[in-house]
Amino acid sequence: MNGNALSTVVAGQHRYGVRVYYEDTDAGGVVYHATYLRFAERARTEALRELGISHAELLERFTLMFVVQRVEVDYLRPARLDDSLTVVTEPLEVGGASVRLRQDVRGPVGSCAVLTVRLACVKPEEGKPGRLPPRWRAALTGMCDAARFGDKGDNRWIGR
Amino acid sequence: MNGNALSTVVAGQHRYGVRVYYEDTDAGGVVYHATYLRFAERARTEALRELGISHAELLERFTLMFVVQRVEVDYLRPARLDDSLTVVTEPLEVGGASVRLRQDVRGPVGSCAVLTVRLACVKPEEGKPGRLPPRWRAALTGMCDAARFGDKGDNRWIGR
Amino acid sequence: MNGNALSTVVAGQHRYGVRVYYEDTDAGGVVYHATYLRFAERARTEALRELGISHAELLERFTLMFVVQRVEVDYLRPARLDDSLTVVTEPLEVGGASVRLRQDVRGPVGSCAVLTVRLACVKPEEGKPGRLPPRWRAALTGMCDAARFGDKGDNRWIGR
Amino acid sequence: MNGNALSTVVAGQHRYGVRVYYEDTDAGGVVYHATYLRFAERARTEALRELGISHAELLERFTLMFVVQRVEVDYLRPARLDDSLTVVTEPLEVGGASVRLRQDVRGPVGSCAVLTVRLACVKPEEGKPGRLPPRWRAALTGMCDAARFGDKGDNRWIGR
């Protein structure tokens, strides 16, 4: 949808490809633990973009932005330089002013890190929660349902 | 102990000062969410150094290293450019081959982010858990007790 | 060549697509100045990969690695969140144990930053210069010539 | 001034202490090349703060900010995990709307990286150059002279 071959959605799951460069690693020879949060943010941004939700539009049309409220990360196995990773993102729960996502950063032989991320939709001026615009809530809920029940591969859930 | 005025221990709590620079912020005008993991790692390293536990010694004498196994972060309020933050680190639980820490990143008006971090002690060659050397386990347990019961301000718990 | 649609070579110039995420920006609302070095490193790595030169092979077969010896960056205009950038990389000069590259990070309305990077090929054990393996020197020289004289679009210069 | 023991000025040179943590390193086992720009920015910010020039005041009172216009870095020897570095900053040249600094990142056995950084003073709204406020220009020029001719150790040049 954005011409990025690395970003696709199937059955309510968004997949995003990431290559590991030196910048992502540390002297332990593996991907630095905070780097997974950067990978997850890239994937999340592209997942939202696929749903037709861009940071820019959210801010300009609705004066809203997503902020990270809570993150949990389980580190399962190290990823290394030159590894080609896939971040699989799926919504777990969509609330009126928040969304909870699961993001699995998969390496060549299995999951490297699994994140649960809670994003809140806020009005940046006031720092207060703001309700998700209905079209976007519908898109996220549709993605949620597709992940849970499977979809027919027709991306119906994108809701546009 | 390391000549760093920014790192002190009182009553089982380690305090470490951090200033926010441009590198730490994002276009939202606040500290980027993954940056708190970097701040916490700096504080943790200095807390362990105060206990007489250096990465280098752990690796060279015992062929052991700490790896992050799980992180939880709650983001409470944004920190901003030029803010002077204090990371307060205290051990919550000391196991045979792991330690769980609470790290509170405090800004001018209260906590910005609270992390719970589980570190595992591993043998990097084999990728298997390795038991914490007794002196270090004692130091961490002492810090834990001091945090729980208070200490007499004499840093007895440092155990050397 | 590596299945990455974002990495292509035409007429001795390697092009690599980069999207700007929050992680790349700072509180000034623009891409943080050190971020361009990270973008350039990603592009460089993919450019070398296109030439058949991987970090891993260089290290394992020849016990050699590239290190950055000198960087010059001119910052021309700011890139911003969500911008889609292209890093255009071309070799300027290929020596026996070094290569000098020009990397132009282009945004929607023109160059954001232009880098000149000198990489040295070293033996990491000894920290001494090591000669570029002939096949790789040829590939880099070919890319250099193609950039200078134009090529027929047949990627002849890749030299394999 | 800021109670930071790690930041001092002597004879027109500002010294700032930096410790190397995992976040600063890469899989090559050394400090990642772009990290030196982050270290230099920290040091620069503290050097300007010592001169009584804070980002916040510059922006609020004068609607001006410093932006990096050009950076040159020579990488001389690798710094490593746990190293304690000193960034020595001195102004080379002070213009009406810009300043050129030399920043030397010194490790235990000598310089690791030497940077030359040209900062421009700009009006962020318009993206145009803005003249340095006279007091600040005087402070920077004083620091420049002190570096060149030596001072009597009384920090006279700070100009307050």
Image (cartoon, coloured by chain):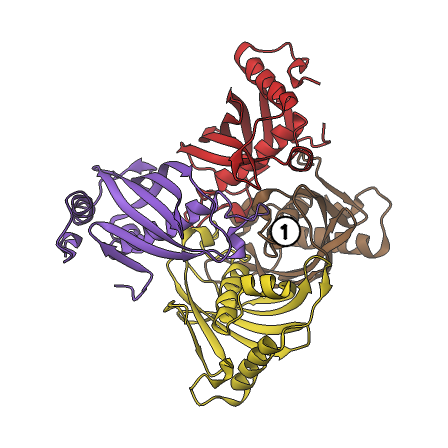
Chain colours: A brown, B yellow, C red, D purple
- Looking at the image, residue D104 sits to the left or right of residue B117; the answer is left
Q: Quadrant of residue C30?
A: top left
Is label 1 in a helix, a strand or a loop? loop
Q: Is residue A87 visible?
A: yes
Identified by mark 1, the residue type is Val
Whether D20 is drawn above or below D32: the answer is below
The spot of residue A50 in percent (x, y) is 68, 43
Q: Nearer the viewer, residue D102 or B37?
A: D102
Whether D15 is drawn above or below A57: the answer is below
Q: Residue at x 48, y 46 (%)?
A: C25
The residue indicated by pointer 1 is A31
Whether B75 is drawn above or below C18: the answer is below
| Chain letter behind tag 1 | A
Q: Is residue A129 visible?
A: no
- Looking at the image, residue D53 sits to the left or right of residue D150; the answer is right
Q: Residue at x 16, y 49 (%)?
A: D135
Q: Residue at x 42, y 86 (%)?
A: B154
Q: Nearer the viewer, residue C88 or C160?
A: C160
